[in-house]
Image: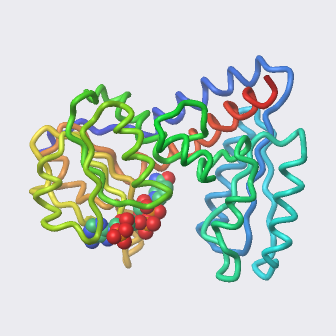
Amino acid sequence: MTTARIIDGKAVAEALRVGLARQVEALSFRPGLRVVRVGEDPASIAYVRTKERMARAAGFDGETIALPATTPEAAVLATIAALNADPAVDGILIQLPLPQHIRPAVIIDAIDPAKDVDGLHPINAGHLAAGRAGGLIPCTPKGVMHLLRHAGTALAGARAVVVGRSQLVGRPVAQLLLGADCTVTIAHSRTRDLAAECRRADILIAATGRAEMVRGDWIAPGATVIDVGINRLPDGRLVGDVAFGEASKVAGAVTPVPGGVGPMTVACLLENTLEAALARRG
Ligand SMILES: NC(=O)c1ccc[n+]([C@@H]2O[C@H](COP(=O)([O-])OP(=O)(O)OC[C@H]3O[C@@H](n4cnc5c(N)ncnc54)[C@H](OP(=O)(O)O)[C@@H]3O)[C@@H](O)[C@H]2O)c1
C-alpha cells in the first residue's frame, strides 16, 4: 500500500515554465540561451534537444551549437569567447560530459560567470559556498529546493542528509539546504554505515547514480525523499537511486523517477537564463 505523497515534478516544472513564459512575454527582448554540445553522446543529444524545445516554447531565443567530437579544446574555448562577447546571449550551457580530450574545468572557467546558467563557474560556486546572494545556482539543486518548498517540507531545523558530493548536485544541494537552515550531513562512497546516516534524515536527497541503492529500511517514517538519480536498467527501465516501491511505503513524500527532479532541471535552466538576462540588461 502506498502511503507517501508523490511529489509531481512534471506538474511543478510546468507551472514554473508557464510563469516564466508570462514574464518573458512582457519583456521587450527574448532572453538568449545557447547550449553547446560537443560530440554525439545519445543522452546528451536528447537532453539538449529538450532544453532547446522547452526554451523556445517559453518564448526564449534558444539555440543549440553542435560541435564534432574531434573539436580541439581551443576551438571550444573560441566558441565560448564568441558567446561571452555576444550581447544577444544571456545564458551559456556546456552539455556534459565532454569528449576525453577536453578538460571540463578549463571550459567551465572560460564562461562569463554572468552567463553561466549552469551555475558551475567557481565564481558562482563560491557565491553559493559563501552564502552570498546574487550568483547563479546549479539547475538540478535549484529544482530540488523548488520541490521541497512545493511539498511543504519544513526546512528550518530539519535534519537533511545528502548522499553524493558531486560539484553538479551533492555539494550545491547541501549548500542550499544549509542556506535554508537545515542541519546538513553530506554522505558519499566512503561514509561508514550509510543506511544509519540516511535513517536519521527528515529530508533525504539521493544523488549517487546507483540504481535503487536507497532501500525502504534506510528511510525514517514520514521523511521527505528527493531522488535525483537517473539510471537505465539492463531491461531498459529508468529508475532512480531510491527503491521507489519500498520508499513510498515509508516516506511522507517522495519524488518518482521519471517525473520528479528531471523536469525541474530544464525549468530551472530557463529560470536562470531569465535571471541572468534581467541582471545583465538591468
Ligand atoms: N535529474 C536530473 O536532472 C539530474 C541532473 C544531474 C544528475 N542526475 C543524476 O543524479 C545522479 C548523480 O549525479 P552526479 O553528477 O552527482 O554523479 P557523480 O558525479 O558520479 O557523483 C556521484 C556521487 O555519489 C557518491 N556515491 C557513489 N556511489 C556511492 C555509494 N555506493 N554510496 C554512497 N555514495 C556513493 C559518490 O561518492 P564519491 O565522491 O565518494 O565517489 C559521488 O559523490 C546520477 O544518476 C545522474 O544521472 C540527474
Quarter of the N terminus within the rendering: top left
Q: Is residue 175 above or below residue 279?
A: below
For residue 88, side relative to residue 153 (left or right): right
Question: Is residue 8 shown above or below 196?
Answer: above
Q: Residue at x 73, y 28 (%)?
A: 279
* Residue 24, image x, y percentages: 74, 25
Residue found at the very far front of the displayed protein? 130
Specify how the rendered protein is coloured: rainbow
Above or below — where is 154 with respect to 242?
above
Quarter holding residue 178: top left
Q: Is residue 170 above or below residue 233?
A: above
Tell me which residue sits at (60%, 53%) in the image. Answer: 122
Residue 230 visible? The answer is no
Quarter of the picture containing the C terminus is top right
Of 173 and 270, nearer the camera is 173
Query: In the image, 171: left or right of 69?
Result: left
Indicate which quadrant contains ligand 1.
bottom left
Give whichever of 67, 249 is nearer the camera.
Answer: 67
Q: Going by the image, does 176 lie left or right of 132?
A: left
Where residue 275 sits in the image (x, y, percent)? 67, 31
Q: Please report the residue visible at 88 percent of the width from the left and 39 percent of the height from the top.
A: 88
Please give the count of numbered marks on the rendered protein: 0
Q: Position of residue 7 (x, y in %)?
A: 33, 37
Residue 160: in sight, yes or no?
A: yes
Quarter of the image where one finds residue 38: bottom right
Residue 185 position, x and y percent, is 25, 50
> Which residue sits furthest top?
26
Q: Residue 61: which quarter of the image? A: top right
